[in-house]
Amino acid sequence: MKHKKTNIIQILETIIERKPKTKAEFDDVRRKVCSSLKISQPSNSQVLAVYKELLKQKKIVKNLTIEHLCMKAGIRSTSGIAVVTSLVKPYACPGKCVYCPTEVRMPKSYIASEPAAARSLALDFDPYLLMQKRIEMLEKNGHPVDKIEYITKGGTWNAYTLAYQYWYIMESFNACNNLTRRKQIPPTQESDWVKKPIQALIDRTEKEQRYNEKAKHRIIGITLETRPDCITPKTIYHMRKQGCTRIELGLQAPDDAILSLIKRGHTVNEFKKAMYLLRCAGFKVDLHFMPDLPGTTPTHDIAMYTSLFSDPALCPDMVKIYPNTVIKSAELYQWFKKGKYKSYGDKALFRTLLAMKKATPRYCRISRLIRDIPSNEISDGNTITNLRESLAQSLKQQNEVCACLRCREISRQVGNIPKDTPPQLFVDTYKTVGGIEHCITFEDPKRIAVFGFLRLRIPKPLSKEEEKEYPWAPQQSCLALLKQIPEIKNCAFIRELHVYGQLVKIGEQKEKASQHKGLGKKLMKAAEDIIQKEGIKKSAVISGVGVRGYYKKLGYRKVGTYMIKKLY
């Protein structure tokens, strides 16, 4: 519904005069003005559009409260970055997993009614349009989008042709760059590159990446979704060339009997080998875990989840917990109809997830708890859409907390710590195969809220005992990786640096926001001190393209696809 600009100006003038501090107070002021004018309430985006116009005309001064309270779904950028998710085109997946939906018009494991999938289908899986339209929508709803975490989902990334991979990434960067580039470079289609050598695509991708280092909309990290049996030194090399910093890797269950039953197509050891190779290259790993699969029980699911963090071959940085659901287009639906499978029910699932949240260590982030599958698509399995909120309430009633990084972000805990609490440095250390991990954080003294964190890996050669215990981690695997990526030899890895808080535009500062307060530099200094104490001369950052400039200011320089600094 259209609203007169004069009415919205009157609403804004009243809001500025009344100075509401909360969303409820903001909505109350707007409602009362609209009632007096006898009009329906304009949307947040309409109010924000007029606010920005008046700001541009210098008729009002910048008001951070209005910007924040007008923001739709503010949670999208409270972690300090704006997330853009898109799907790749439908393509044959090497997996035959019984639980995966198989819609012809969608990449395997996705259904058209999921929000991100629906957006991708509507735009014919065009990476250029997907990126630009999403940025435009986020900006319209008040979100700063100059620092973008780009998540590319759908099927298995490495199963697609190399040309498609580079074209998809290149056009995603092109879309960001063209939003403010004076002379735009027209988007291309995949077919335009069929007769050209792959190197031409790689060169064009690198050109767009170089431009993006100083663009207004910078891609500061890329997440790719793939299978453990697709992880090799060669695929790792190409994913780094594409700008990837994090891998989503489906384990589903650390139990070979279950993996065989669900036709997963790989073993637990194959997954561990993939984790090892990715860690050797400094990647972050977001592990997928699926409770309520065929062949398990609530007790076994809890035990398997707990083992993720006690087994040094696993210890994921992040975990997505996807409770199994029965979708009609999946093979599992036939099992369900024949009585061969039945979920263990909402109450048992709730208790299981509650135990999992309690078992999650401080260094891990539970990035997801359910899939965005509409309940009408689910024949059996979880249909509770507000699981996170319900679990949080239950923990609160039990006087317990989830210690995962997501739950402890400062933006979620700001009301639970004293105002102006000074950040304190903490270092949590744990062993993984082939290295020692340090999760360095700035938190309040009681460790309720996290202001920022850094993941540091100190590589360690395997002992003879470890080589026997982990036969899937032979020395030749690392040597093959170093042959592809020689710049990382004898380096310690800074695998992630993240300062939490409402995303702050590059070059700006917001009062009360925790970004750009110097915490990042202090975390880097703490990491470099540890590296030097270990006797390692070089530090390598698996940097996203859009933050290379930040590391350059700290004395790092680009070598290959990493930002590297000689410490002494």
Image (tube, helix red, strand yellow):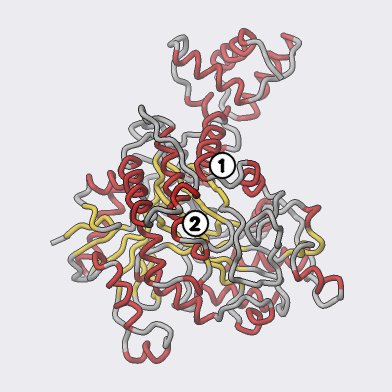
On screen, residue 110 versus residue 167, left or right, reads right
Q: Answer with the quarter of the image where residue 432 lies.
A: bottom left
Q: Residue at x 37, y 45 (%)?
A: 422
Q: Given contact means CB atoms under 8 Å apart, are the residues at marks 2 and 1 in contact?
A: no
222 above or below 211?
below
Q: Position of residue 452 (x, y in %)?
A: 40, 50
497 vs 146, nearest the viewer? 146
Residue, far left: 568
Q: Secondary structure at mark 1?
A: helix
Q: Amino acid at mark 1?
A: Ile
Q: Answer with the quarter of the image where residue 302 lies.
A: bottom right
Which of the numbered marks, if any, corresponds to residue 375?
Answer: none
User: How many neighbours does mark 1 have within 10 angstroms: few (below 14), some (14-19), or many (20 or more)?
Assistant: some
Tell me the quarter of the image containing the N terminus.
top right
347 vs 283, nearest the viewer? 283
User: How many neighbours does mark 2 have within 10 angstroms: few (below 14), some (14-19), or many (20 or more)?
Assistant: many
Q: Residue at x 66, y 80 (%)?
A: 258
Which of the numbered marks, if any, corresponds to residue 75?
Answer: 1
On screen, residue 12 versus residue 110, left or right, reads left
Mark 2 and mark 1: Cα distance apart in space: 15 Å
Q: Position of residue 434 (x, y in %)?
A: 35, 77
Q: Residue at x 37, y 31 (%)?
A: 181
Q: Amino acid at mark 2?
A: Leu
463 above or below 421?
below
For the question of whether residue 56 can be seen, the reply is yes
Q: Mark 2 or 1, which is nearer the eye?
A: 1
On screen, residue 280 versus residue 22, left or right, reads left
25 vs 398, nearest the viewer? 25
Which of the numbered marks, if any, corresponds to residue 405?
Answer: 2
